[in-house]
Amino acid sequence: MSLIDSIKELKEENDAVIVAHNYQIGEIQDIADFVGDSFGLAKKVAELDVTNVIFCGVEFMVESAVILNPHKNIIHPELKAGCPMAEMVDTDDLLQYKQKHPNTAVVSYVNTKAETKAESDICCTSSNAVKVVESVSNSRVLFVPDKNLGNYITRFVKDKEVDIWDGFCGTHDKITPDDVQELVDRYPDAEIVVHPECKPEVVDMADHTESTAGILRRAHESDKDHMIIGTEKEMGHRLKKEVSDKEYHFPGNPTCQNMKKITLEKVLKSLENLEPVLTVDEEIARRARKPLERMVQIGRGSE
């Protein structure tokens, strides 16, 4: 029996569903029941009537699914698949900031650890970040942890003072204007769509700035034959699968090595043993659930 056939068989036997992030390698996306962005997958898990969920993504994504689905077994095939940007928020530093600025609202990107969310007033996704910051009543906001997304927010939010944490996504931050220009020179009619985690000067070059869901939507809507996509290169697998009549080009070939740590072999092992189950401290989960639920009430913006 092939590896993929074994995965399919065990999935049925163990009442399990596989969900995978858009940045997972193609063969993981292909065996997943659902593919999407991190918070979209966490919400999808909540809708599923299953006991076991194999979540193929990095740690903070799986934590969000655990927090929002406390009665399901959320299994992470590779516990070492973390997110360097999420690690850039030190809880002690955040607490010190809150003590110094008690009237400042803390808005945390979903790309943060559970401990960070627990100290936040509300969370946001890349697609609704502007809407979330505009929604808070405070005149001053701390946005953590992504400085590039924070700077993107300030393009639209003019009536609040926005303090921005000095964090970044190494994958998106490495995309340079020269990388984009090289592709523009080769494909001058291409539509440029980049993720707001990119540098401001890269955002300035784009026709559209979108979350991964927004990038997929643009692919469906665009009349261009070529698209320059400023995000992790595995997004190309889903784009080509769902909108096959276009060519997609990724400036700088951006790669998240942590996403690549999950393999078919590890998924099979997780299904065989139904572990490792990722857990979140009960008190931290209780506190982190509130800002996530507030975000849900605000809505996902353009997605």
Image (cartoon, rainbow, N blue to C red):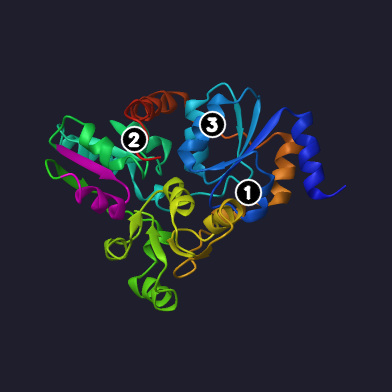
Instruction: Give the residue displayed 37% in from the left and 51% down from the top.
Output: 210
Residue 2: give its label: none
Q: Secondary structure at mark 3?
A: helix
Q: Which residue is mark 3?
A: 44
Q: Which mark lies nearer to you, 1 or 2?
A: 1
Q: Position of residue 6 (x, y in %)?
A: 81, 43
Q: Residues within 10 Å of mark 3 (few under 14, many from 20)?
A: some
User: Which amino acid is tagged 1?
Assistant: Gln
Magenta extent: 140-157
Q: Is residue 273 above or below residue 46?
A: below
- Nearer-N-terminus badge (1/2): 1
Q: Nearer the viewer, residue 205 or 253?
A: 205
Q: Which residue is mark 2?
A: 123
User: Which amino acid is tagged 2?
Assistant: Cys
Q: Is residue 154 above or below residue 110?
A: below
Pointers 1 and 2 in contact (CB under 8 A)?
no
Q: Secondary structure at mark 2?
A: strand
Q: Is residue 293 above or below residue 244?
A: above
Question: How many angstroms separate mark 3 from mark 1 (CA)?
Answer: 15 Å
Q: Which residue is mark 1?
A: 29
Left or right, 229 with reference to 137: right
Q: Position of residue 226 (x, y in %)?
A: 48, 66
Left or right, 142 with reference to 177: left
